[in-house]
Amino acid sequence: MHWFARLLLFFLLILCPIIILAQNEKKDTVVQERRALLASLAGGMVNLTDNIATIVRHTGRKIRNEVKDFNAIDTNYISPNKYNLAFMLEHSTWYEHYRLGNNNRNHPKRLSFSPTLGTKLGVYFGWRWIFLGYTFDIEDLFGDNKDKPKKKEMSLNIYSSKFGVDLYYRKTGSDFKLRSYEGFDLNDPSLKDIHFDGLQSSIRGLNAYWIFNHRKFSYPAVYSQSTNQRRSAGSFMAGFSYSQHRISFDYEKLPPAILDRLSPSMQFSHIKYSDYSLGFGYGYNWVFAKNWVSNLSLLPGIGYKKSKIDDNDFKNESWIKDINFDLITRAGIVYNNSKYFVGASLVLHTYDYRKPSLSVTNSFGTLRIYAGFNFWRRKPSKP
């Protein structure tokens, strides 16, 4: 058996190095495979990063080109703004008017309300064609109106050469007056211009409009001072508007002589309606002197109104009865030498709400007088 043990030992001495060498070769193969896998993953990440960077650059160029296209102008008619930012102070006066009627052809009755003209101060800050501002009532600072419901107005305006968007919120106070009445068989002058705190309203919404002749006609030149109109031009416009209206009416606070003759259809507490309107109109910029331009534009629209009166829907009525007419009127005049500007503008909205037994005409507008300046001059654009 000694010879068998010696033979076994001989084979072990020969096989051990071979086994160890094979294991080392296997380990080297695994390491190489892992290194190759890591290298492949690293290469893939590099390629992915390069692809993402390419997409981002391409998207950025496309967005810049789209923005340039939105603001493309004919420099023979319009000169572009040379600054990035603008600061403006304004003095504004509110106008509001509500007319309520019973729509009775045989015995029509009308009541008209409007508040005392409100005076407000506003601070606005603009970045190119975006303008954001906040206004506050002067009487809130110096008057004794702490117990009265506050008037509020906020707006965001976005203007470019091709289109514009106005976002707004407006809430009235309680300083309405009964301005006139019709159909009540009364002739009492003391009933006119009397204080009436039974009416409050709020409105929020947006106006969006498209300028067809945007290369020659500039809305921003008058209403955001972000360009300069150098030659007179006009344009047709198309628009869409959406607004929500809430009207609270405490008719029991009317004078007894009118309350006794008030039609049942006018004895409501709340009206809530949403207005969807499509419009088509025309605007014109008149350059009557160097750095001076004035504008007048009318945008009539056909509006569909979905409404509730005292939380009651009108589901049994034909939808055609909910079609009414709206109107947006704009007028303005401005002096702008590119650095400094001063001007005035009027924006007037008229909404007509009609049901078989009730009609409400709501008009509100703002007259603004403003002055401001542009700063942070733009770098010359690359070709």
Image (spheres, rainbow, N blue to C red):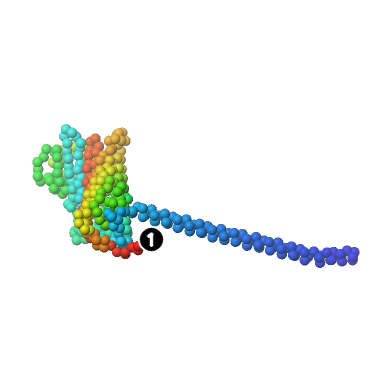
Against 162, residue 16 (above or below) is below
- Foreground: 252 or 93? 93
Q: Residue at x 28, y 38 (%)?
A: 323
Question: Which quadrant holds residue 44?
Answer: bottom right
Against 80, residue 13 (above or below) is below
Q: Secondary structure at mark 1?
A: loop
**Which image quarter holds the C terminus?**
bottom left
Name the residue type under label 1. Lys
Q: Which residue is mark 1?
A: 382
Q: Residue at x 81, y 65 (%)?
A: 14
Q: Residue at x 25, y 37 (%)?
A: 355
* x and y, in percent, of residue 174 in the image: 21, 50
Does any portion of residue 310 appear in the rendered image? no
Question: Which quadrant holds residue 12?
Answer: bottom right
- Foreground: 120 or 131? 131
Question: Which quadrant holds residue 260?
Answer: top left
